Image (tube, rainbow, N blue to C red):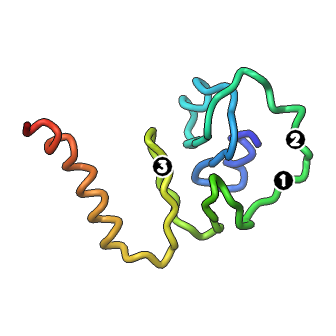
Amino acid sequence: MTTAAARSRNCAGVLVDGPVTDVPELAAGELPVFSRESTSLTTKRHASGQAEFGVPVTIGGVRVRPDDIVLGDDNGVLVLDPDVDPGIIRQAHASDEAEPEILYLG
């Protein structure tokens, strides 16, 4: 799946349970892409042409449903139920923001 196809489906990002190619181009793009690894081998000839959108998938042993909240950065991806208390997300974000200060206090 290309990021152009994902954007045309109004996706907020792409999770790949495998390798991706063209990492610099993906990083420079507008759509975040998270994958297990990178490779120089093209995957263009591996496509079945039968992609599905809006269906639950399992990535890395974690079930991801269409309405889940998915947060990601260079360190990994977190999948949350859409009914999670927003206070938990705010608390986690505040903790993440405070981390550089905590690390440099020593």
Q: Say if 6 sits above or below 94 in the image.
A: above
Mark 1 or 3, nearer chain start: 1
Q: Residue at x 76, y 60 (%)?
A: 53
Q: Dot 2, how many residues are within 10 Å of its Cα: few (below 14), some (14-19), or many (20+)?
A: few
Q: Image quarter for residue 47?
A: top right
Q: Say if 45 sits above or below 47 in the image.
A: above
Name the residue carrying label 2.
47
Mark 2 or 3, nearer chain start: 2
Q: Residue at x 48, y 78 (%)?
A: 83
Q: Say if 81 sits above or below 35 in the image.
A: below
Name the residue carrying label 3.
72
Determine whether label 2 and label 3 are within 8 Å by CB.
no
Position of residue 92 in the picture relative to residue 45 (left or right): left
In the image, residue 1 lies at what x, y percent? 76, 43
Q: Amino acid at mark 2?
A: Ala
Q: CA distance from mark 2 to mark 3?
A: 25 Å
In the image, residue 79 lies at what x, y percent? 52, 61
Name the residue carrying label 1.
51
Q: Amino acid at mark 1?
A: Ala
**Mark 2 residue element:** loop
Position of residue 37 in the picture relative to residue 84 (left or right): right
**Mark 1 residue element:** loop
Q: Dot 1, how many residues are within 10 Å of its Cα: few (below 14), some (14-19), or many (20+)?
A: few
In the image, residue 105 lies at what x, y percent? 8, 39
Q: Residue at x 30, y 65 (%)?
A: 90
Q: Dot 3, how many residues are within 10 Å of its Cα: few (below 14), some (14-19), or many (20+)?
A: some
Q: Amino acid at mark 3?
A: Gly
Determine whether label 2 and label 1 are within 8 Å by CB.
yes
In the image, residue 69 lies at what x, y percent? 51, 64
Q: CA distance from mark 2 to mark 1?
A: 8 Å
Q: Where is the C terminus found, in terms of image quarters? A: top left
Position of residue 2 in the picture relative to residue 44 (left or right): left
